[in-house]
Amino acid sequence: MEGRHIAVIGGGINGVMSAWALLDRGYRVSLFEAGQLIGATSRASSKMLHGGLRYLEQGRIGMVREALLERRWWLERGTGLAAPFRMHIPLYRGKGRPGWMIRAGTLLYDLLALGSKLPRSARHSRDDTLAAIPGLQEQGLLGSVSYWDVRMDDEALGRWAAEQLIRRGLQCHSGLPILRLASNGELECAGKVRKFDAVVNATGPWATQLLEQSGIACPWKLLAVRGSHLVVARPLREGCLFQQDDGRVVFYLPFRNLAILGTTEARADPRDPVCASETEVEELLAIHARHVRPALRRDEIVEVMAGLRPIVVPRGKEGADTRTASRESLTVRTGKVVTLLGGKWTTARQQGLSVADEIDRICGRT
Ligand SMILES: Cc1cc2nc3c(=O)[nH]c(=O)nc-3n(C[C@H](O)[C@H](O)[C@H](O)COP(=O)(O)OP(=O)(O)OC[C@H]3O[C@@H](n4cnc5c(N)ncnc54)[C@H](O)[C@@H]3O)c2cc1C
């Protein structure tokens, strides 16, 4: 495909990994990012390369298996920006999901992770759980079930991936928003129109908005759900998952030499600035106080992060329950434009491969 020039719009992990797959296939690639590379959702995640234990409850076995295997690919890059860690699910008398159900879930997780070379899940005594998670609420604590996942520095790892591509010839234009795109491969930015052999719309939560403002119809709509995290000055060695009364889970994980606590779920409008509300900060502090002693002080908050989860729903089903809506990704082709909708950080490489398959079709390669 020497000579074919592809534009990728969006410098989050999905844009970067789409560019990765396209460069691997011999395309010339230019990437346009409105702000900074890895400056939006892809730096505000829960920082886990994971299958997502809770998706097993929703029966999304294939998605979990794919993500569990992708963890290995990121570890094998040897960046030092991703490492396996143990996550504890504390078990309390009469609260949360029953221990047998959690144990069954983690055993299935182990089974689906076969081939990923991470340690297996285990059951822990009360004392071992308290030693692993300092300050954990002791009243009614029975012990914990632990399983293994991979934690990452999402911003640094995403930038590492982008730097590899820039060395390989990716033309990167940061601070350059695309105002309009057309199905014939034309892009409008900074008062100029440029034409490409094909275009990838990898603008994450803003993907259907960009199509709408370009007058391109799409059968899908993205609902934005804001998730916020607190980065707090409480060094942690192992991770912990707090079960909420409404079935939600909140993660408390080691991050750099600190800890990260989140996430909230609040419906949002992608046209608004993405930042956590005071209510979300208070909610997270209250959740922490219910589970860990001493309670967090405001001056222990190092950073508040917020990102938008793009939830894909068919147009006309905007009232869907965002908690149970699929986290799987899909690609939509309109002429020479491929739009990537949804997906996870963990599976961004696979999402990039799907985008490249569509581009191959547009360019007559398959
Ligand atoms: C709270 C939260 C926690 C999460 N936790 C995890 C997790 O632990 N593990 C996991 O695997 N996944 C997680 N996810 C999902 C994961 O973060 C996302 O799937 C992923 O980051 C999406 O990447 P993206 O490139 O599609 O979007 P983004 O990172 O948002 O990138 C899109 C980019 O497009 C740019 N853009 C928008 N419009 C234009 C335009 N017109 N012109 C040019 N550029 C434009 C934006 O500036 C942005 O940089 C989480 C998501 C959230 C919200």
Image (cartoon, helix red, strand yellow):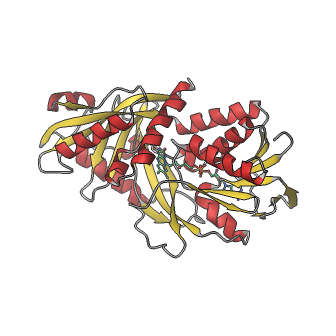
Q: Point out the residue furthest to the front here.
A: 366
Question: Which quadrant of the rendered structure holds the N terminus?
Answer: top right
Residue 242: horizontal and vertical position, in percent? Answer: 28, 46
How many discs appear?
0
Whether residue 49 is visible, yes or no, is no
Q: Nearer the viewer, residue 149 or 262?
A: 149
Q: Nearer the viewer, residue 136 or 103?
A: 103
Q: Nearer the viewer, residue 304 or 317?
A: 317
44 is higher (above) or lower (below) than 88: below
Residue 238: horizontal and vertical position, in percent? Answer: 33, 31
User: Does residue 347 appear to the left or right of 118 in the view shown?
Assistant: right
Q: Point out the residue furthest to the bottom here.
A: 316
Q: Which corner quadrant of the image does residue 291 belong to? A: top left
User: Does residue 86 appear to the left or right of 258 in the view shown?
Assistant: left
x 66%, y 44%: residue: 18
Whether residue 306 is visible, yes or no, is yes
Residue 333: horizontal and vertical position, in percent? Answer: 68, 60
70 is higher (above) or lower (below) than 77: below
User: Does residue 127 appear to the left or right of 16 in the view shown?
Assistant: left
x 64%, y 41%: residue: 17
x 69%, y 31%: residue: 164
Q: Nearer the viewer, residue 214 or 364?
A: 364
User: Does residue 300 appear to the left or right of 310 in the view shown?
Assistant: left
Residue 296: horizontal and vertical position, in percent? Answer: 32, 43
